Image (cartoon, helix red, strand yellow):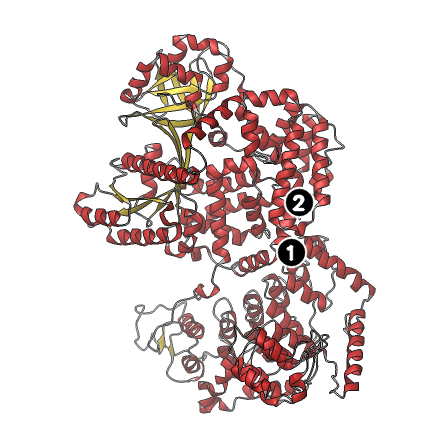
Amino acid sequence: MKMFCILENVKNFQITKNKYDVTSLKHYILNGKKPSKRVRNENMDLYYQYDENLSNNEFFKKLQTEHKIIIDTAPLENWIVCIPRSNTIQLQKENLADPNFILAHILIPNDELPKTHFTNLLGHDIHMENQKLVNSKGIESIVLFEEVFYTITFMKYKVWCIECPLYGDRIPKTSGIFIVRDLRDAIELIWNETQSKVIFRKIDNACTTYTNQHKKNEGLDKLQTTIQLLYGHCLQMLMFNKRLKEKCREDLHFYKILKIALETYVMSKLYDFVFDAICVNSLEEGEQFNKKVRNLSQVHLTYFGIDQKCSDLVTSVRSELLKIEEYSTAIEKLACLRRALNATSRHSPKNLCVDELISILVFVIIKSGLTHWFATFKFLKEFILNDLKELSDKGADSFLITTLEAAIFYIKTFNESKRPVDGPIPLLEQKRSFVSKSDFIEYLHSHIRAGNEQEVIRLITSEKDIEIVKEHPTSTLCHPLCDCESCTVIIEERPNVNTTNRNGITPLHVASMNGLPKMVNLLLALNADTAATDENNWTALHYAAARGHQNVLLLLLHAGVEINCQTNDKYTPLHLSCFNGHQGCVKALLYHSDHIKVNIDKNLPNKMGDTPLHLAATWGFVEIIETLLEYGVKIDRINRLGHTASDYAHNSFVAELLQNTFVMVDDDSSNTWADDPLFTKKEERFRGYIAQNAAVGEITLPIKTDNDKIIAAIKNGDRKLAYYFLGLNLPENDQRQCHPLCTCDACLESEKTKDFNENHFKCDETLDYNACNSDGVTLLHAAALSGDMNLIQFLLSQGASVNAKTLKNETVLHFAVKSKSTAVIELILSRVSDETLNSTDDDGNSAFQLATRCVHSVRSPECKGSSQS
Amino acid sequence: MENTSENKYSFKVVLLGEGCVGKTSLVLRYVEDKFNKKHITTLQASFLTKKINYNGNRIHLNIWDTAGQERFHALGPIYYRSSNGAILVYDVTDEGSFQKVKNWVRELKMMLGSDIVLAIAGNKIDLQKDIIVPLETAESYAESVGAKHFETSAKNNIGVEELFLELTNMMIASHDARQTENTDSRTNSLRRSNRLVVADSSDMEERHSSRCCGNG
């Protein structure tokens, strides 16, 4: 929200309409944008911005030629040689003739305080204050950089390049050295030097022309080179100013800083365009990254090896880093990053090493709630150009960007499976007596996480065998482990399948959040309460949806969990799946509601008034947005801040997606598929196709929207979903029939399991296995392409036709060949009719021709043999 | 000593080694002549620069600390790519840290080949009694991988200066060797540097335009 205001203000400020005086520019920056806080230790910035070759400095040359004795003595006496930067020397060349001028710049460190107090060779005291040398006359001079000179005999002495001479009556202007720390500095510098509004207008026009002429999807490389050209063009315009050109010629440092100022200004004008271009060009990467971030959002500080004591530190880093997306220039973004990382030194007793730095950065990125980290990183990595790049490559900026890259890379490659279970590892030996109820629950939970079914059954079902000491807050035990009669009281209330811990977590919650379908199945069979909620009103379904465990989610849905249940913060499971980018779960939830005819409310607002679409749009989960739109969610819903989902669009691609749909939904307020104009069009195409095929005497293909989804699922390689739609068990889940539960006498008759399986069987019969999608692709086509033998065999056994053709006249065999799986091809060949075998697709290729084309990659002698026959 | 020509080198040096072998102390000792890590910012502790002038050559050293923990192992290449030199630090009182150095050497050789100059530093030699890794073993190992071995103590300021100076020398040699290799066929490197000087002092416009805009 805040960000939008700021962006809006920046956009509203039209520099071309304003008067070009510094105050109005300041006014803009002060009011249009939060004033950026000035960095405290400014000298650090200077430290790496200023550089000169001291060997060419007149002062140093003079020393070397006429005062060699000083140079020779310096290493022996630890003298420090101060050299005023070359421009100030050139202005006061006459001073060089004065020996005192030279002597005033040779410092002898004080015996007691060698770092801060000095005496020069004239005997005057000089001290250092915040990297500034101050003499008794009050002349201040910043130490710009230190260079250590080595003699031939490897003796060394320090040379400090300073801002201005320390000796002389004329106190030089302090504004002698220029720096650019932010956009304001940049604008001020250009304005002060040119005093011309024309140049600003010209640059603005050039930038506007650029953004109009170029497309965001051109590719980042091309944008980069064209921006370079634009910048070069702007620099030329700036250099038309004769006086400025002369000044640049005289002072190379000024020239460098001016170019940085120009780049900063130009890039700030292009920022919105470039930033969005980065988002659009790295849609998928950004999406993946955001999904990782979202799914790690619940982790605890200690998970990244950060000391609990550092929580203050993390807060201060976070508060600095949150501003990074507000800044529109690389300089400010980098300064923000630098401040954030340096904020660690304020709170930490010791300095942090790189490992800790990365840990903290990773943690803060995850907890920041910012949605454009990947683009921010890309911007810093790819769109710092020219002199600024040269500068940042050498300095600490490069280290900052690398550290950010390391943190981003770490999150990106973070392996969910490496994530340790949130609790202790179970003990190997069976535990029979427990000191308290919470001890028992902890033990039970650890076995659920580990998937030890037998132990879980024992713990939940067996009446005897388990002793739990009753907790008596009032009476005390003889000693903590006492088991005398008065202390040991077997708890009357037996632990059951719904026993909760202090946070209201039931065994079903534990199994669901850890994604253990077998365990969920077992607990459901043991009559676990599916509607049980924890302290935040989360059901097991919420956990499954939030963590993306599609299989568990489906099991729970089948067990009849309320699909629209809301947490304390009014999140539905659909919200959580959208929030965390679990496309599979979103599809499963929506499909389930369609299939079982349970009404899912896709537009429920959460506490902040955000619908699932708001969340998906904010985080840029494109596929989820597409799925939601496909299911006709309302896109005009506003949240509590009065924003629709498209206001929160992560990038222009998402925004367009939402805006284009807006019209469609508006035209047709009902959400059902049949009334959808697009759908009717599809249907017409179908009918045309069927008529065409009917003439040839082929089978007629009834229309079924369900099959569309199944085909899409098979095509996308989403086996779980596809199998679920077909009512099949995943091959690896086949053992479900023979897991300990079923062999065990007590549980074999469990109604729950039976019901569940029957439910499954019912689903099968509602399907037509010869239905096709809009391209004429049947289930068998899709299955053949996926190369899934189980699925193909199942479909064939259900009577799916091997001779079906797509709209492009491709047979199942064509698809089988494309799958490059010999087993599939063999299977299809054994069933297919001769006519189909030799039929060609619209491109004129028979399956055999297709096979020969890819024969170098597949060995299919059988295929060839049988085709020839 | 006529050195108007700008012989400027900018080197990136990475520090590799296990957590508590004293990587930061070593650099801090060299750059700031401090041993205690107090009074510097976090960034200063992990990224330090030093300008030195030696034999008329200006050398800008950027010294990078890197992630050392096992879980950040995959981040190594992000840090050490395009570096000119590496200092591999181990603790002479800790055999394990020396083994780690060997792993790092193997990885660097694999990823960067001979482009990188290696220096191995056995730190904490002030703890004489506890020395476990024998000097001979370390030195012969260093020799076998084409690295230079140093014994250092950041605490007592032993061998630190030598380590960095020698490494700098090796980097200059390696850099120049590559430079002449590249320019051999085209033109004499000496002539080239002379020409650069002329461009430098007479017309800054030309020098800069060639670098910045590239379009003239």
The amino acid type of the residue labelled 2 equals: Asp
Nearer to the camera, B125 or A436: B125
Tell me which chain the residue with mark 1 is part of. A
Query: Residue placed farthest to the left in the image?
Result: B129
Q: What element carries label 1?
A: helix
Tell me which chain the residue with mark 2 is part of. A
Q: Is mark 2 on a helix, strand or loop?
A: helix
Q: How crowded is mark 2: few (under 14 residues within 10 Å), some or many (20 or more)?
A: some
Query: Can residue A714 be seen in the rendering of this structure?
Result: yes
Where's residue A822, x and y in %?
53, 81
Location of the C terminus of chain A by quadrant is bottom right
Determine which quarter of the picture holds residue A729. Answer: bottom right
Residue in the picture at 68% in, 23% down? A195
User: Which mark is drawn over residue A618?
Assistant: 1
User: Which mark is drawn over residue A760?
Assistant: none
- Does residue B13 lie above or below A532 as drawn? above
Is A759 placed left or right of B3 in the picture?
Answer: right
Residue in the picture at 75% in, 61% down? A661
Where's residue A130, x and y in %?
44, 27
Determine which quarter of the picture holds residue B52. Answer: top left
Determine which quarter of the picture holds residue B57. Answer: top left
| Residue corresponding to mark 2 | A272
Residue in the picture at 50% in, 19% down? A87
Query: For the residues marked 2 and 1, what is the alpha-carbon distance in whole angstroms?
Result: 17 Å
Query: Residue placed farthest to the right in the image?
Result: A667
Query: Can residue A563 be seen in the rendering of this structure?
Result: no
Is B46 placed left or right of B167 in the picture?
Answer: right
- Does residue A641 lie above or below A781 as drawn? above
Where's residue B213, x and y in %?
59, 35
The amino acid type of the residue labelled 1 equals: Thr
- Does residue A629 lie above or below B55 as drawn? below
